[in-house]
């Protein structure tokens, strides 16, 4: 029943309403509410970016699956699948952080919410007690009790205001209850979603460990079987040719930088190391210790702890930042005048294609993507398409 200005409930109905209202107020359980909730833009952008990266990696996996009798392709699939799992794990962890933040926001409303409910409770209780105590006097009673007409009009005015105030308080209270019920259900759903995401993240971690075991088994096969090793070597040589073609294409693109670059050749012998670590693969022609096969290495591999920062050796322009079969996650920086530096086996990129980088700037993290020696940085220097010995260009240590 809706009250209109100047109208009150019959006394019996007020008693019933009063009893029901106090019963409801006394049994009302504390709940949470989130006012003015908005999605976290930073989290949302990160989630969208991760979704796109996952989709791109899955396309690469399908492409590799079409290659037959290829050890590098098998290695690539493991590398890419690990990358997908890492991205999916990152996605779930980001989502968990987002939901955690939403729950914290909801819980932060509890003190003010309780205070508001207490105020509404008291206001409603006072009105109900007053009306129940004084009953519902009619206009005739006001005329008989009043000394003059002004008092009657004043009393009637007060009744109208009281009716408006009653209606407003009751309306606010009912709306608050409705909001609380919706918020409580939403909070329960958020908590359930959080638990599901935690379970999915744990599943991705187990799958990631399984991929790690598969990679170790494949590397052991390559290291212990001469035929597998020679096949891998042939495929790596083919990929080295593909890399040379890529650099040749990049060489045709014009480099434009908003600042002057000191020519790389002026820094020969004084360039900083891209990361700290031990050299495990040397530049040039090397003999395999077990199979006694001659190998031509166009760069060096520096063993380092996983996720060690990789830094640009000189100012330049990122012209390639993507997965490249045989080299893993690869960055190529153009330093001008046809000089390039290459950084392979990365776990994560800290820059993107098209970025301008400065000497010493972190550009990636050490990983083991397509690496046969564990976590390491594969590092090359090239003039045009010709590989240069990095040890002659990096400063002595």
Image (cartoon, rainbow, N blue to C red):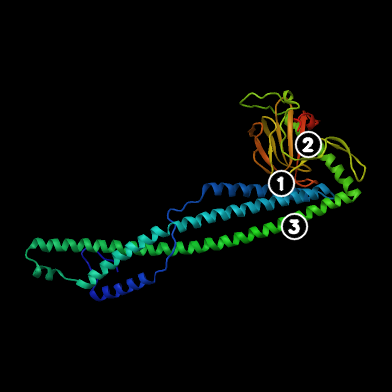
- The answer to whether residue 58 shows anywhere in this view is no
User: Label 3, on which residue?
Assistant: 210
Q: Position of residue 250 (x, y in %)?
A: 73, 31
Q: Earlier in the sequence, mark 2 or mark 3?
A: 3
Q: Position of residue 150 (x, y in %)?
A: 9, 60
Q: Secondary structure at mark 3?
A: helix
Q: Which mark is residue 243?
A: 2
Q: Which mark is residue 306?
A: 1
**Is 189 left or right of 278, judged from the image as shown?**
left
**Quadrant location, the C terminus:** top right
Residue at image point 10% right, 62% down: 151
Separation of residues labelled 3 and 1 (CA atoms) = 18 Å
The correct choice, above or below, for 391 with respect to 186 in the image is: above
- Count residues near mark 2 (Cα–Cα under 10 Å), then give few for <14, some for 14-19, many for 20+: some
Q: Earlier in the sequence, mark 3 or mark 1?
A: 3
Q: Position of residue 184 (x, y in %)?
A: 46, 64
């Amino acid at each position: 029943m809706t009250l209109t200005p100047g109208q009150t409930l019959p006394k019996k109905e007020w008693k019933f309403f009063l009893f029901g209202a106090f019963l409801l107020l006394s049994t009302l359980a504390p709940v949470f509410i989130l006012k003015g909730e908005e999605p976290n833009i930073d989290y949302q952008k990160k989630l969208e970016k991760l979704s796109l990266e996952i989709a791109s990696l899955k396309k690469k996996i399908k492409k590799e699956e079409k290659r037959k009798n290829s050890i590098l392709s098998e290695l690539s699939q493991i590398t890419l699948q690990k990358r997908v799992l890492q991205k999916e794990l990152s996605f779930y962890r980001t989502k968990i952080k987002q939901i955690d933040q939403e729950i914290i926001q909801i819980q932060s409303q509890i003190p003010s919410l309780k205070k508001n409910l207490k105020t509404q409770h008291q206001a409603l209780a006072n009105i109900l007690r007053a009306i129940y105590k004084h009953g519902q006097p009619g206009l005739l009673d006001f005329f008989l009790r009043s000394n003059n007409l002004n008092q009657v009009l004043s009393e009637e005015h007060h009744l109208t205001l009281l009716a408006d105030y009653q209606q407003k308080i009751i309306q606010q209270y009912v709306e608050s209850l409705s909001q609380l019920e919706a918020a409580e259900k939403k909070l329960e759903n958020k908590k359930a979603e959080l638990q599901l995401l935690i379970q999915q993240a744990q599943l991705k971690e187990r799958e990631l460990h399984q991929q790690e075991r598969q990679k170790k088994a494949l590397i052991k096969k390559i290291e212990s079987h001469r035929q597998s090793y020679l096949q891998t070597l042939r495929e790596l040589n083919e990929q080295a040719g593909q890399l040379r073609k890529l650099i040749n294409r990049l060489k045709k693109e014009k480099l434009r930088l908003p600042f002057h670059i000191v020519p790389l050749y002026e820094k020969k012998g004084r360039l900083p190391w891209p990361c700290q670590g031990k050299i495990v693969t040397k530049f040039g022609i090397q003999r395999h210790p077990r199979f006694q096969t001659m190998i031509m290495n166009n760069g060096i591999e520096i063993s380092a702890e996983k996720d060690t920062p990789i830094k640009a050796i000189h100012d330049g322009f990122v012209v390639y930042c993507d997965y490249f079969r045989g080299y893993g996650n690869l960055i190529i920086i153009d330093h001008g005048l046809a000089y390039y530096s290459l950084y392979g086996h990365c776990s994560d990129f800290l820059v993107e294609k098209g970025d301008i980088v400065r000497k010493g700037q972190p550009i990636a993290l050490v990983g083991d993507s397509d690496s046969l020696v564990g976590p390491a940085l594969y590092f090359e220097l090239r003039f045009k398409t010709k590989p240069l010995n990095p040890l002659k260009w990096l400063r002595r240590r």
